[in-house]
Image (spheres, rainbow, N blue to C red):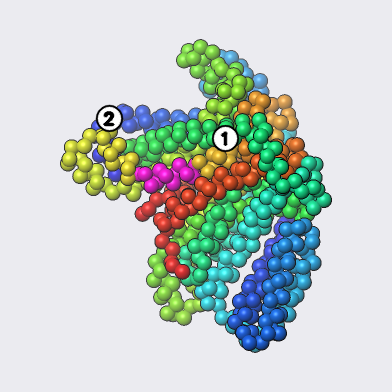
């Protein structure tokens, strides 16, 4: 669409722009990565080296052996996978109802989910804390998993509803003529062709639960064996004499799954984020 | 742990099932028992039991256990008596209720109950206690205390300043990123967009940590720029109030420009190409085309993107918590970080809730605009 502009923007100018965008997005990551490869103490060495003269994986080794960082990564994996699976199921059910079933108060139902989802975690955190305390879920992983499943439902419903709405309605009508019940239409007709939508909702849920901090920080209350990655990294700098090679190594380790997901599912992420924002 | 999760899931399924049965029984009950007043009384009393359970949950979570069990039993008994007349064929409405119920109950528990509870907290004097039943009711005193305090005025000021500046920067950088991704050859577009999305995917607290290291005065970006002679001296990014405020804005802009870019890529992609051809025939030049064609056609997307980002900027918590912790002094405290601090550092649920309600009111107003903007763009099957 924009190739017309090529005529007045010379090729070098366009690729300079691309270089700037790449530098802007990747620069901080690159800096974290080089810091993680430096031996301890060398991160403060002057003059600053843009690539370490001595590359070592010491920081990674120490983060894994001395800080038990793999436990944090395992916790994050458990939390994110459970949250992703369950929240996509819940969101898929409600999205199907909103996008394809005829019933009264449909707009109100969608508003109930969406406006609720706009409420920031910091506003709900104190009562959430007291609920979890009375359920005995403080300082446990389920205490993080259970509320977070619901935190991912509004967006998931939104993405999936916009996906379901784009599937032809003739499918339902034809299935109905064939004598399918509404429930059967859902799992025999719609679900089998909805996997791209389910995947993109899942990617969002995974990424958000991987990075959830405020609830995790409140639930875990400093118990290190059950902390997820964001809380552990926040506490690296609080508990220890700030070791930036360790923190950088921890950051790089924790970002590997996320960045892989984003690169693999890049197209779906973009489509999912613009669901509803753009009129097609 | 998985045992506990499984038990929780079982309990939840039971809750959904009972509630669903209750909704059906009450709906059908009123239809069936039009004449029979005694049967109608039974339906009314089950309805009342549901309301009583919710209210007792609001008063204290533990008080709700008894009424909940009672309600469940009453629902089953009523369903048993009405079973011959109960029409349980699953029509579209019934399936819709069944499908929405698991999400709705969760939303009630983890979003709507906390909001009501936070409003209740904000009306009580809750220093060192969350047992509002045993504490004095103080009306709007918490709000008055908060709105007159220097902390609130400073943090509200910074929250709005932060939102305005960072959303403005993110918009222009995001627009530049989005347009660049159309300028380059096809084979680069996918790679470039993949790279643009990366900062969005990095958790905010980790972004904050990365930038905390980059803002190191001795070996961070300031020092790198000084080493290359671009600036004479590396500034104290996080040590001086004004520098710290703008450091938070820079880090936030880095992370969220990508979201702006993704929204705008979506918007640019649907601008029909023949419009540009027509403009070309009319002799419109590049920059003129951008101002007179691209920007106006992009306006709906821009409104949605800016609203979306503003909503999230106004609630900023992680970025500040991880980057400056609110310091130096209270220079970079936002309303959200103060709410959290009052809750868990100063153990004052009353004042914390007053801050939280302030955030809530601001955001819910924007949210209503936002949802109404995007609702029309989705083609759902009607009522």
In the rendered structure, find residue A171 and report the number of the disc placed on it: none
Write the residue at 62% across / 37% down.
Answer: B335
Q: Which residue is mark 2?
A: A10
Q: In which quadrant of the rendered view does residue B208 lie? A: top right
User: Residue B234, how many percent across, how many down?
Assistant: 55, 16
A9 or B374: which is nearer to us? B374
Residue at point 72%, 62% (across, down): B55
- Labels 2 and 1 within one chain: no
Q: Which residue is mark 1?
A: B159
Q: Which residues are magenta?
A: B298-309
Q: Secondary structure at mark 2?
A: loop
- B133 or A226: nearer the eye? B133
| Count of numbered marks | 2
Q: Position of residue B237 (x, y in %)?
A: 58, 22
- Is residue B174 at least partly visible in the picture? yes
Please state the horizontal and vertical placement of residue A137, each as a whole percent of the image.
75, 52
Q: Nearer the viewer, residue A148 or B373?
A: B373
Label 1 crowding class (10 Å Cα cut-off): few <14, some 14-19, many 20+? many
Q: Secondary structure at mark 1?
A: helix
Up-down relation of residue A268 to residue B282 (above or below): below
Compared to A169, does B340 lie above or below? Answer: above
Residue at image x 67%, y 56%? B113
Query: Which of B40 and A134 lies nearest the eye of the viewer?
Result: B40
Residue B303 forms part of the magenta stretch: yes
Q: Which of the 4 quarters of the picture holds residue A258?
A: top right
Magenta: main secondary structure equals helix
- Chain at numbered mark 2: A
Among the 4 quarters of the image, the one containing residue A135: bottom right
Disc 2 to disc 1, C-alpha distance:
41 Å
* Badge 2: residue crowd in 10 Å (few <14, some 14–19, many ≥20): few
Question: Any magenta on residue A41?
Answer: no
Q: Position of residue A82 (x, y in %)?
A: 64, 55
């Amino acid at each position: 669409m924009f190739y017309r502009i090529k005529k007045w923007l010379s090729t070098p100018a366009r690729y300079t722009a691309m270089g700037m965008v790449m530098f802007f997005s990747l620069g901080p990551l690159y800096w974290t990565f080089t810091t993680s490869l430096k031996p301890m103490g060398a991160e403060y060495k002057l003059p600053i080296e843009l690539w370490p003269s001595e590359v070592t994986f010491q920081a990674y080794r120490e983060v894994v052996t001395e800080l038990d960082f793999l436990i944090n990564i395992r916790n994050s994996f458990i939390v994110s996978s459970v949250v992703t699976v369950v929240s996509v199921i819940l969101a898929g059910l409600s999205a199907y109802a909103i996008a394809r079933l005829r019933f009264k108060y449909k707009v109100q139902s969608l508003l109930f989910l969406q406006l609720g989802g706009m409420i920031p975690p910091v506003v709900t955190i104190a009562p959430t804390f007291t609920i979890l305390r009375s359920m005995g879920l403080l300082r446990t992983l389920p205490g993080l998993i259970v509320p977070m499943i619901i935190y991912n439902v509004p967006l998931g419903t939104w993405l999936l509803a916009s996906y379901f709405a784009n599937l032809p309605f003739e499918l339902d009508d034809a299935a109905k003529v064939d004598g399918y019940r509404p429930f059967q239409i859902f799992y025999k007709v719609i679900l089998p062709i909805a996997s791209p939508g389910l995947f993109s909702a899942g990617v969002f849920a995974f990424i958000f639960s991987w990075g959830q901090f405020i609830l995790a920080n409140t639930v875990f209350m400093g118990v290190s064996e059950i902390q997820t990655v964001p809380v552990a990294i926040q506490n690296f700098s609080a508990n220890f004499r700030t070791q930036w090679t360790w923190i950088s190594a921890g950051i790089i380790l924790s970002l590997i799954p996320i960045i892989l997901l984003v690169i693999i599912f890049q197209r779906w992420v973009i489509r999912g984020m613009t669901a509803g924002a753009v009129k097609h | 742990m998985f045992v506990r999760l499984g038990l929780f899931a079982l309990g939840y399924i039971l809750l959904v099932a009972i509630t669903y049965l209750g909704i059906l029984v009450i709906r059908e009950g009123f239809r069936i028992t039009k004449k029979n007043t005694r049967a109608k009384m039974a339906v009314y009393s089950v309805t009342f039991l549901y309301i009583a359970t919710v209210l007792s949950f609001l008063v204290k979570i533990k008080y709700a256990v008894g009424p909940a069990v009672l309600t469940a039993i009453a629902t089953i008994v009523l369903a048993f008596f009405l079973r011959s007349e109960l029409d349980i064929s699953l029509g579209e409405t019934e399936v819709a209720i069944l499908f929405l119920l698991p999400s709705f109950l969760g939303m009630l528990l983890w979003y709507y109950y906390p909001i009501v509870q936070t409003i209740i907290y904000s009306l009580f004097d809750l220093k060192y206690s969350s047992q509002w039943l045993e504490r004095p009711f103080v009306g709007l005193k918490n709000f008055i205390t908060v709105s007159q305090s220097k902390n609130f005025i400073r943090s509200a000021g910074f929250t709005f300043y932060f939102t305005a500046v960072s959303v403005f920067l993110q918009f222009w950088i995001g627009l530049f990123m989005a347009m660049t991704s159309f300028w380059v050859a096809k084979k680069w577009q996918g790679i470039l967009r993949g790279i643009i999305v990366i900062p969005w995917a990095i958790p905010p607290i980790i972004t904050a940590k990365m930038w905390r290291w980059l803002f190191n005065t001795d070996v961070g970006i300031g020092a790198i720029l000084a080493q290359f002679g671009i600036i004479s001296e590396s500034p104290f990014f996080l040590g001086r109030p004004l520098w710290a405020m703008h450091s938070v804005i820079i880090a936030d802009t880095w992370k969220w420009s990508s979201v702006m870019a993704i929204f705008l890529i979506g918007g640019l992609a649907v601008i029909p190409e023949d419009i540009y051809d027509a403009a070309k025939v009319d002799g419109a030049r590049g920059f003129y085309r951008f101002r007179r064609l691209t920007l106006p056609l992009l306006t709906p997307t821009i409104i949605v993107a800016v609203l979306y980002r503003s909503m999230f900027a106004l609630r900023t918590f992680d970025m500040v918590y991880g980057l400056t912790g609110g310091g130096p002094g209270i220079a970079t405290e936002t309303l959200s970080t103060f709410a959290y601090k009052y809750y868990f550092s100063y153990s004052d649920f009353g004042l914390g809730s007053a801050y939280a309600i302030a955030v809530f009111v601001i955001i819910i107003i924007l949210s209503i605009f936002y949802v109404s903007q995007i609702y029309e763009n989705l083609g759902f099957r009607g009522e």
